[in-house]
Image (spheres, rainbow, N blue to C red):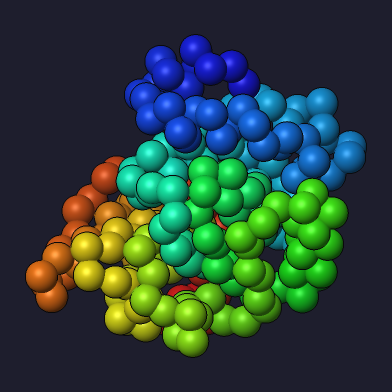
Amino acid sequence: MVREQLEARGISDPAVLGAMFAVPRHLFVQEALRAQAYEDTPLPIGYGQTISQPYIVALMTQLLEVQRGMRVLEVGTGSGYQAAVLATMGCTVFTVERMRELYQITSGLLRQLGLRGIHMQRRDGTLGMPEAAPFDRIIVTAGGPEVPRPLVDQLDEGGIMLIPVGSKPRTQRLVRVRKEQGRVSSEDLGPVVFVDLVGDHGW
């Protein structure tokens, strides 16, 4: 993974590029796959889950339009890589993981790395984290059949949410939701493939 490759594919935000190269991606993958950590490809992290390819992480972070000091809810912690990128950009990250095993592994890694500003919980991510709401930004890193209403409700005025949505598992469109002056709008940003979003408002 080199800067020129990301820039050639439209990643232009200096803060995003800086965070992508500051976070040691190889620490977020299994030891046997570390030689492939910087290739632009998703990799398995166990338990049927994956770490997204670097380009997708960079793209979604750029589309989220984050700024230092923002409060971001992440649904689907997974390896913790996306949360680490956002925290490195100066965001306070509230991240939710459903799977017990991943929660235990990833929370331990994030503590070990000493990343500040990341608050991780194990729960149904489709319900969000209402006690910490509202959020300036919400990023969902798994695909479900709809945009969960609890997440829309927890998005602050002027907020942005990115979420893969599709009528079939593993076949989604990336949707960007905005809340402006009390109105909620959405735009289709194209096809993506993510693991399934499981929960009360997922599969």
**In the image, 24: left or right of 193?**
right
**In the image, 182: left or right of 49?**
left
**In the image, 48: left or right of 63?**
right
Q: Nearer the viewer, residue 177 or 43?
A: 177
Residue 14 in the image: above or below residue 121: above
Q: Quadrant of the N terminus?
A: top right
Please identify the residue farthest to the front as the structure is shown. Answer: 69
**In the image, 123: left or right of 139?**
right
Question: Residue sitting at 38 percent across and 30 percent down?
Answer: 13
Q: Nearer the viewer, residue 79 or 154?
A: 154
Question: Residue sitting at 66 percent across and 25 percent down?
Answer: 39
**x%, y% of residue 135?**
39, 70
Question: Residue sitting at 77 percent across and 53 percent down?
Answer: 114
Q: Nearer the viewer, residue 170 or 200?
A: 200
Task: For residue 146, say whether it is visible.
Answer: no
Residue 103 in the image: above or below residue 123: above
Choose top left, top right, bottom left or bottom right for residue 133. bottom left
Please identify the residue farthest to the right as the structure is shown. Answer: 32
**x%, y% of residue 120?**
66, 70
Question: Residue sitting at 16 percent across and 69 percent down?
Answer: 184
**x%, y% of residue 55?**
50, 32
Task: For residue 147, say whether it is visible.
Answer: yes
| Label total for image | 0
